[in-house]
Amino acid sequence: MSVRGFPSKETVLRIKKQYPPGTRVEVICMDDPYSMLKPGEKGTVSFVDDIGTIHIKWECGSSLGAAYGKDVIRRL
C-alpha cells in the first residue's frame, strides 16, 4: 500500500495485467455489508481503475467492483 491506503502504481499495473477485460472471476468474499453478491457468484471483468478496483459485470446483474485489499475474487 502507498499513500492513504491506496495501492502503488506498480501494484495497480500488476492487477491490470492479472485481470484484463474479459477475464472470468468468482467471488470468494466481499467486504461490503450492503452487497447482494454471495461466494460463488461469477462475472466478467470490465476494467481495472487507477486505484486497483476491479470493475466486474456479474451474472446476477450487479456491477459492483472488487476493492483492492478488501474483497477477494479468483480467476476462473
Image: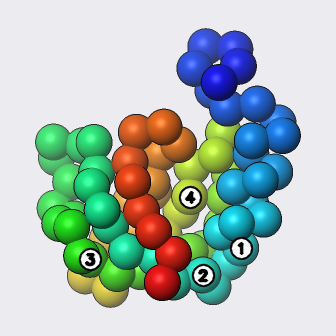
Confirm whether residue 31 shows in the render.
yes
Labels 3 and 2 touching (C-beta < 8 A):
no
Cα distance between the residues tagged 3 and 1: 19 Å
Q: Quadrant of residue 62?
A: bottom left
The answer to the question of whether label 3 and label 4 lie on touching residues, with beta carbons closer than 8 A, is no
- The residue pinned by badge 3 equals 41
Label 1 secondary element: loop
Contact between marks 4 and 2 (CB within 8 A): the answer is: no
Q: Quadrant of the N terminus?
A: top right
* Amino acid tagged 1: Pro
The relative height of residue 12 versus residue 28 in the rendered view (above or below) is above
Q: Is there a contact, CB below 8 Å, between mark 2 and mark 1? A: yes
Quadrant of res 19: bottom right
**Quick one: SS at disc 3?**
loop
Depth order, front residue of 50/10? 10
* Badge 2 amino acid: Thr
Q: Amino acid at mark 4?
A: Ile
